[in-house]
Image: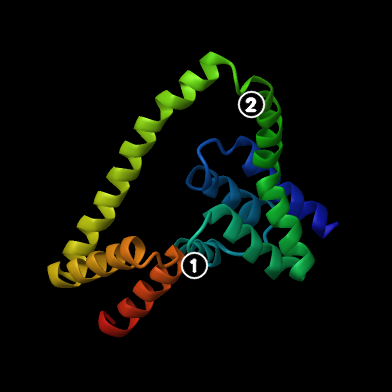
Amino acid sequence: MVYWHLFVAFLIPGVVGYGGGPASIPLIEHEVVHRFDWMSTQQFGEVLALGNALPGPIATKMAGFIGFEVAGIPGALVAIFATVAPSLAAMLLLMKFLLKYKNHPRVQQMTALIRAPIAVLLGVLAFQFFSMSWSDSGAVQTVVLVGASLLLLEKFKVHPVIVIIGALVYGAVVLA
C-alpha cells in the first residue's frame, strides 16, 4: 500500500502542478507532510534545500529522496515514475501530433518563430549567471573561468561535461 501512496503523492502534484518543479513544491509538501505524514515541515525544508543544491529537476530529486526514505529503492523508483509520468504522457501524446504534422508549413513557421525567444531567454540566463559570478567570486575569477571555458570548448573541443567538472573542481579548490 505504501507504493500506491507514494505514487498518488507524487502523481497529483505532477498533474495539477502547472509550471514545473517550483509550482509543484507546495503540492508535494501537502502530500508528504500533511496528508501522509512521512516527514515534518522542517525535514521537508531540508530535503528542498538539498534538492535546490543539486543540478536537475527539483521535483524529481525530491521524489527520489522521499521515496527512498519511505520505501527504499523501489519507493524511489515509484515516486520518480509518478513525478515524470504526467509529463511523459503529455510528451508522447504531443509527439504523435508533431510527427504527423512536422512538415506542415504552420508547424515549421512556429518552430522558426520560437527560436528567437529561446535564444533570448538563454542569453538572459547566461548573463544572470555571469553577473552573479562577477559579484560573488570577483572579476578575476569570472574572467579566468569564462576564458578557460571558451578556450577549452571552442579551440580544443573538450566535451562540456569535462569543462563543467573542471570548473567545479576549480571553484572547490580556489574559491573555497
Q: Which residue is mark 2?
A: 98
Q: Amino acid type of disc 1?
A: Leu
- Foreground residue among 53 and 156: 156
- Left or right: residue 164 versus residue 139 is right
- Answer left or right for 14 relative to 117: right
Indicate the position of residue 29 as horizontal and vertical percent values: 57, 52
Quadrant in which residue 107 is drawn: top right
Q: Given this view, does label 1 or label 2 mark the residue nearer the observer?
A: 2
- Tell me the quarter of the image containing the N terminus: bottom right
What residue is rendered at 23% in x and 63% in y? Answer: 133
Which residue in the rendered view is the most extreme toward the bottom? Answer: 173
Residue occupying the far front of the picture: 155
Figure quadrant of the C terminus: bottom left
Q: Write down the residue under mark 1.
A: 50
Which kind of residue does numbered mark 2 sit on?
Answer: Leu
Taking the spot 77% from the left edge, 53% from the top edge, the residue there is: 5
